[in-house]
Image (cartoon, rainbow, N blue to C red):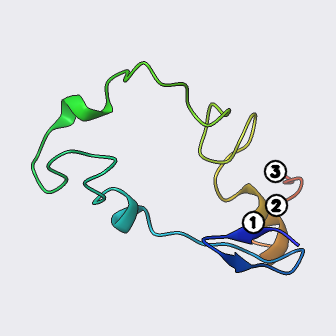
Amino acid sequence: DPELGGHALPAGTTIIYSPYQVHRRADLYPHPDRFDPDRWLDSGRPAAGSRTAAGRGGAVGRRARREDGAGGGRRAA
């Protein structure tokens, strides 16, 4: 089983994170509570291997729409 922060995670575990908390980590973002739009400019570090938050070619919410039946599938005019 994979591990996260020293905790064993059963296979198939869903992991949810808080962008609010991550963006306030001073070790990642100096002065996290200061308004600084330049912090989002190219840092020279590669992104985590994806072009979007949902991964390559994905759209945030696409999977959720399919799973809850709201807006997924073909539409008739």
Q: Quadrant of the N terminus?
A: bottom right
Q: In which quadrant of the rendered view does residue 63 lie?
A: bottom right
User: In the picture shown, does residue 60 fall above or below 45?
Assistant: below
- Name the spot of residue 39 as percent of width and height, x first: 25, 34
Q: What label does residue 77 carry, if any?
A: 3
Q: Which mark is residue 72?
A: 2
Please report whichever mark, 2 or 3, sits nearer to the chain's N-terminal start: 2
Please state which of residues 34 and 67 is positioned toward the viewer in this rendering. 34
Name the residue carrying label 1. Answer: 65
Of tags 3 and 1, which is closer to the observer?
1
Identify the residue shown where x is 66% and y is 34%: 50
Q: Position of residue 40 (x, y in %)?
A: 31, 33
* Residue type of the residue flagged with mark 3: Ala
Do the CB atoms of the residues marked 2 and 1 lie less than 8 Å apart?
Answer: yes
Q: Residue furthest left?
A: 34
- Describe the element under mark 3 as helix, strand or loop: loop
Q: Position of residue 7 (x, y in %)?
A: 68, 80
- Residue 23: x and y in percent read 33, 56
Q: Amino acid at mark 1?
A: Arg
State which tag comes first along the sequence, 2 or 1: 1
Vertical position of residue 30 compared to residue 11: above or below: above
Badge 3 crowding class, 10 Å Cα cut-off, few under 14, some 14 to 19, many 20 or more, is few
